[in-house]
Image (tube, helix red, strand yellow):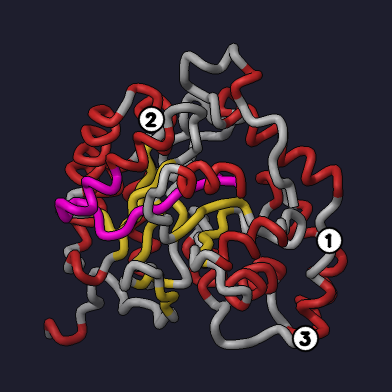
Amino acid sequence: LFAFLEPRVAMALKVPSVALHDGTSMPLLGFGCYKVGVIPGSATGAASAAPPAPAEQVISDALKAGYRCFDCAQFYENEAVIGAAFKAAGIPRSELYIASKVWNDRIFEGPAAVRAQCLKSIEDLQCEYLDLYMIHWPVPGKHLEAYQELMKLKEEGKVKSIGVSNYTVEDLAELEAAKLPLPTVNQIEINPFLYRKKTIAHFASQGIKFQAYRALSNFGKSASLESEVVAALAAKHGRSASQILGRWCVQKGFQHIPKSEKFSRMQENAQVFDFALDKEDMEKLENLTSEATLETFKSTYQKCVLRDTPLEAQKELAKSSITLD
């Protein structure tokens, strides 16, 4: 009788891995946890956002859909609930790849606060250690010492790999000038409508890999999925628009971390390894980034590096000259 019972969690998806320069590797597909169960108080549009689905159910469904890599963060305000969902699923820690990021407020407060937050994330996620821990934004005058604390946490085994998020070429140069080891990854928005080729090439030349957030939605808008170019490719391949954009992402070698509250959409988003875009397809998606989009990126960056810190009123502290493309 018991042999016919459905297991609590399905088998893991078969996902290729990308090698990192520190000798570890990360899955090329993960599940994004932003706005899972909680809309952060300082998130854009938080006041008017619809209530999200319960985080426990979303994470449980993602695990059932076969996801084993999860992109978490202090800022998302949901790590304790996600950790409870991990524990309830009973999946061995060795089968999960768990990433988290330390937010600006702790980065501003200094190394001790960064350390305390890392340990809290580990406790909340009930995960013993983090596979990857990142600086969420390069807070001016503060991110270097925060990064050095991440290095110490790695030495102690609390963190397997260290990375950064939303770093520009100029932010990386600050790490290099301080003669600090390079991060393994940089997590930034990447999609055909915000495809910053010079920045990506510069980091890649240093052996740094990319995690792409918003691969399916430029600045959180649905225009990417509604693009005529994407629609034509979807029709050609008999795929959805999200699968075309997801395939473009992984085919470029960027980790894809889509998020959905719907189980069917979770499954759909994961189906990007059983087909390929040809050279002509890739070329059609190559040059869709506009100057206006790059300027929007710049203003977003300048705002977010100071966000939730006492520096917010000192806008001049954000870099005025950065590599946009």
Q: Secondary structure at mark 3?
A: helix
CB under 8 Å between discs 1 and 2 = no
Whether 81 is among the magenta residues is: no
Q: Which residue is mark 2?
A: 107
CB under 8 Å between discs 1 and 3 = no
Q: Residues within 10 Å of mark 2 (few under 14, many from 20)?
A: many
N-terminal label among 2 and 3: 2
Residue type pointed to by label 3 = Lys
Q: Residue sitting at 72 percent across and 35 percent down? A: 321
Q: Which residue is mark 1?
A: 288
At which x and y percent is residue 163? 41, 53
Question: Does residue 74 appear in the picture of this structure?
Answer: no
Q: Secondary structure at mark 1?
A: loop
Find the magenta span and give its range. 150-168
Residue type pointed to by label 1 = Leu
Q: Residue sitting at 41 percent across and 37 percent down? A: 144
Q: Residues within 10 Å of mark 3 (few under 14, many from 20)?
A: few
Q: Nearer the viewer, residue 57 or 38?
A: 38
